[in-house]
Image (cartoon, rainbow, N blue to C red):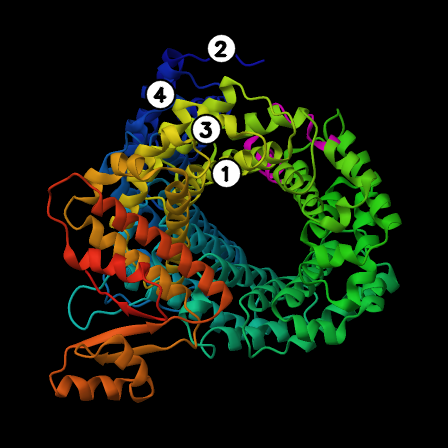
Amino acid sequence: MHQHITAQSLRKQLENKEQLMHTLKHLENRVTHDMVPVLIEILKTVDQAIRLVAKLIQLQPKEFNSQTLQVAIQRCLTQPINITLLKAIGALLQEFKIDTPDQFIRLVFRCCFTGIPQFGNLQPEHVVTDLSSDSEGQSDAAQKANSKIRSTSILVLKTLIKEFPLYFQSNWQLFLQKLLQLLQHEPRKNTKINLVHLIIVLLDTLNVSKWIQGIEIVKHQHGFQPKAYVLFQGVKQIHETALALLSGWKQNDSQFNIQLCKLEVYLMQECRILTKLQDQEGGIPLYQISLQLINDATVKTSAMQILNVLVYEGIKTIDVKYLIKQCLQGIKERNENNNNNNELFIQECYQLLQKCQSHFHKEFCELVNCQELQRIKQPNIQYYRIFEEISCVAEQGYQEILIDVALECLQSNAVELVPAGFNIIGNLQDQFWQKQSQEVIEKLIKQISYIHGQLFSDTPFNMSSLKITFYKAIGTLCSSNSVLQNPMAVQELSQMFNKLQGNNVHVLEKSSWAAANLSSLVNLNQEFYQLFLNFAMNTKEKISTNGLRGLGYYLMKCQQATINQDLINCYANALASKNPKISWNASTSLHNAVQGNCQELLENAKIRQSILDVLTKGDNLKAQMHCVELVRYLKNEHAKDYLRSLIWILVKFKNHDNFIEKKYQTRMRESVLFVLEGFFKRLSLEELIHALDDTLHEENVLERVATEIYAAVLDRKPKDSQIIIANSDLSKQEVLQLQQNFKDDEKTFKQQLEHSYIINQYLSVPKDEEFQGFFQQMSFIATTLYNVIDESPSDKLISFSALEALQELSTDSSLIKIYSID
């Protein structure tokens, strides 16, 4: 046993070098904090002890301090490079990165650059020489030692990049250029591999992909270049260097070729380099090199990874059919020979087939039929993922086997295969289920029901990721009328939502979606009421909107709904939500509910106030549209405020050119007018005057309302109905007589303008039955508004043209003058 070593005993041995060296050798993992000053002094003064002290630092960096780092750096700069000391510096940097002064970091750079001769001078004019010439005249041991020093320096640089990335940003171009030059000339395999790793760390740490992805790389004509452009040029240089080195793959070590392939995969996947280059710069040469590499048994897996990315990117110049044949051949040979030596390559083959099915569907279907898929069958996830892609399209030729494949996955004891079965089911649409027999559906439902029991028990199946795919499949089945025609399916599916408490948010998102789908098509039992209420009151948007959707369908179908304070608060708060999706779904859900037996909800003042706030204060068009529909269910005594809000919606109406917005706004305008019509029929003229008189007499209100009524009429007119342009001096009878002479075309309009006519436009009211009914509704609204103004006790002035426009619509005529009041 060695005697106990203390700081004091260690200091006494400074004069006896032999004894000191012996003690240091036996101090591994025994350094204490009080020994550090002595060890620092030894590091400063005893050259022979540098390696031993450095090893102690490596083993216990936490016991040392930033002063140790400073001394280690100075020794590294003044002595021949010591590998152990370089590693010790790397360990200290990781431990004291927060307390490390800037000058220390710069000195560490110098240490590393000393270890790599080509970095000794970071000036642009410095030229890298071929390192192979350095080996001339050196022994194998010397060459190996120098290579180790370069390799260790690169590892320390990797630590520097990770811990202090800002120091590399300013020297990005120059530093990268030196790395790439060294990569081309370094003779040693391990050092070259470390260089590739260093380049990937550099790209990753500086977040290069974020800067160059998804933006157009633009070069300024003069002066300072944008950061994205500078970084992209560096990435392009890396790609060109890797491509050049791969071109000479036969002269390279196989492990180095593998790392170069990984570097290219990183550039394609993370930096999306192919999207920034022409095919002849990126996709085509990579494809050609990969076809050569695939013949090398040691590198073919990496080559297949590159081909996978090229197929995923949809590079059109590659021969997809050839690749499919290569994959099929590789898998068949593996199956026939029962050879598991290159399982990674086989997995890449399956992945490439999957991507070909997705991105080159036509070519895949021409070469791979059901029989071919059966011949390459393997019980692994990559094989079944091909069917996940197939199920998204469900071509006629594959439909026969999709259910069988899904059942194979669901009945497997391998947990990793089960999600593939659920994904296949989740991708199939109602058209597919229409063609399935009831026996097939029942068999599938029974297996899913069995797995449901496993998912929420103490089994390997109890995983959130598996539950998410489970409810994806359930949601698809719950949205298929063909499946839900089977009473057994409805009963089993209804039982799959009773163990959701305590699950994570993603499981609740999918399960709430599935439950809402089921609620939209079938009557559910009372247990679902509380389930939907809990979903609807969840703070997460997707869960809340799904819960509201399901709740509305449930209440619409329910014969005796339970209306309690929780339900009232749920709807009132959701309507008032600042989240537009929640507010919109709440209004839709409430509209569905009141169409059933839940009109009582509108008796609640809190809900009515929320509806009024959406109509008057919000700008959520979809929510407003459904709240307008809700107003028609209100009792007459609540009508006054809501009638005003409907009028103000028309006053503030904005016309959009966007097709989707225009579609919703056209529907919104008609909804408002229809609800107004309903109240105008239910209320007396005196009640309408009391409710609307002040509002209609405000500035521009009547003009805007009349304009929107005319807009609704013109939106509904049949496409072949005629707009007649005529001189304003003509009477309606004269216009009808001259109707054939005045066509709705630009030439006629210009001719009349040249003669300084005042032009009027007329609508020849179509005889179309549907339009006639709509026109009568608008005519009734216009007549009622006219009567409200006519009988009003107010002495405020009103627009004569607006009154004239309303009166025009109320006349029984086959020709209507179109008023433009705005």
Q: Is residue 27 above or below residue 167?
A: above
Q: How many marks?
A: 4
Report whether 787 appears left or right of 93.
left
| Residue 36 tag number | 4
Q: Amino acid at mark 4?
A: Val
Viewer-nearest of labels 2 and 4?
4
Q: In the rendered structure, which segment of residues is drawn in magenta? A: 495-513
Q: Amino acid at mark 1?
A: His
Q: Amino acid at mark 3?
A: Leu
Q: Is residue 342 visible?
A: no
Decide which of tag 1 and tag 4 comes sooner along the chain: 4
Estimate the spatial distance between the alpha carbons at disc 1 and disc 4, rounded to whole Å: 77 Å
Query: Residue at label 1?
Result: 591
Decide which of tag 3 and tag 2 comes sooner along the chain: 2
Query: Residue at label 2?
Result: 4
Q: Secondary structure at mark 2?
A: loop
Q: Amino acid at mark 2?
A: His
Decide which of tag 1 and tag 3 comes sooner along the chain: 1
**Residue 78 x %, y %:** 28, 43
Decide which of tag 2 and tag 4 comes sooner along the chain: 2
Decide which of tag 1 and tag 2 comes sooner along the chain: 2
Query: Residue at label 3?
Result: 602
Estimate the spatial distance between the alpha carbons at disc 4 and disc 3, rounded to whole Å: 79 Å
Neighbor class of circle 4 (other Cα within 10 Å; few <14, some 14-19, many 20+) is: some
